Image (cartoon, grey):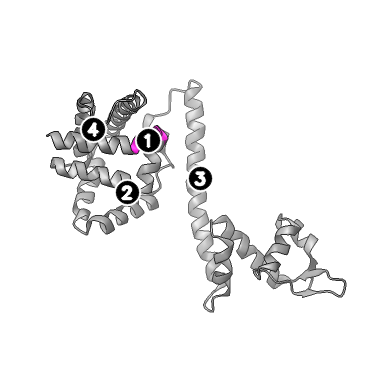
Amino acid sequence: MTNYTVSEVAAMARVSVRALHHYHEIGLLEPACVGANGYRYYGREELLRLQQILIHRELGIALSEIGAILDAPDFDRLAALKGQRERIAGQAARSAEMLRTIDRTIADLEGDPAMKDSDLYSGIVDPKKQAEYEAWLEDAYGPGIRDHIETGRRKMESLSQAERDGMMAELADIEQGLAAALRDGIAPDARSLDPLIARHFAWVTASWGRDAPVAAYAGLADTYLAHPDFVARYERIEPGFVAFLAGAMRSWAARQ
């Protein structure tokens, strides 16, 4: 069986010697043996463990957690690799689709008229993320919300592509108008925002596929503030936008 020095392993794995020393110091990756010369030597088992460490790191798991995962009595390296392969393959497929979307957008901006507006988001909306969001809604509002989710889904699926594009264009116009008001220093409870918020209310109820009470719309403001994905989305539009939008929604609803 071949044993490798720390320098050879670092070169193979494309990590630094210092990183391998650190893994040794914290008990995450012990060498197979330490020679009389003080050199660390690594065998096949250590190489496979290092592979798992690096895969877990790429998947966003902290070093402090990796050791516990790898040292758990029920840890199965083969099963772990199969699960990791499935997860990474899904990410790769989505990344490949996103790359194609970016390429099509570049072509569109360079004058290629063939790209549809709806293609701008291909590969960017993650079905798994949508499922996680729906589960979050059920946890937050109870199983009764599932009927509303399904109603909204059926509504969106019933629309033609042109109708969907029109809805997204309407939403973007509303949000940009509100972002401009935020930049201009208009207070979220200002009545001058009423036309924009009324349009937003109409857009929300259309996407829900049902008439909804104003109180439900006001409650949606809480969802925007509570869910990190909504916060991240709205803060990309304009810093402070999520709180501004939520405040404007509640103020408008209170006046109805």
Within the image, what quadrant is residue 160 found in? top left
Front tag of 2 and 3: 2
Query: Tag 3: Cα neighbours inside 10 Å, few (<14), some, or many (≥20)?
Result: some
For the C terminus, the quadrant is top left
Marker disc for residue 200: 4
Front tag of 4 and 3: 4
Give the residue number, with chain letter if any, for mark 3: 95
Tell me, yes or no, whether the two marked residues, 3 and 1, touch with CB atoms within 8 Å.
Answer: no
- Marks 4 and 2, the one that precedes in the sequence: 4
Tell me, yes or no, whether the two marked residues, 4 and 3, touch with CB atoms within 8 Å.
Answer: no
- Which secondary structure lies at badge 2? helix
Marker disc for residue 226: 2
Residue 204 position within the rendered picture, expressed as x and y whole percent measured from the top left: 22, 38
Count of number-bearing discs? 4
Vertical relation: 147 (above or below) 49: above
Q: Is residue 55 left or right of residue 9?
A: left
Q: Is residue 20 left or right of residue 184?
A: right
Mark 3 is on which residue type?
Ser
Front tag of 1 and 4: 1
Front tag of 4 and 2: 2
Give the residue number, with chain letter if any, for mark 1: 240
Mark 1 is on which residue type?
Gly
Q: How many angstroms separate mark 4 from mark 2 (CA)?
A: 19 Å
Q: How many angstroms separate mark 2 from mark 3 (CA)?
A: 28 Å
Residue 61 position within the rendered picture, expressed as x and y whole percent measured from the top left: 54, 60
Query: Tag 2: Cα neighbours inside 10 Å, few (<14), some, or many (≥20)?
Result: few
Mark 2 is on which residue type?
Ala
- Which secondary structure lies at badge 4? helix
- Marks 4 and 3, the one that precedes in the sequence: 3
Magenta region, residue range: 236-242
- Marks 3 and 1, the one that precedes in the sequence: 3
Residue 182 position within the rendered picture, expressed as x and y whole percent measured from the top left: 34, 28
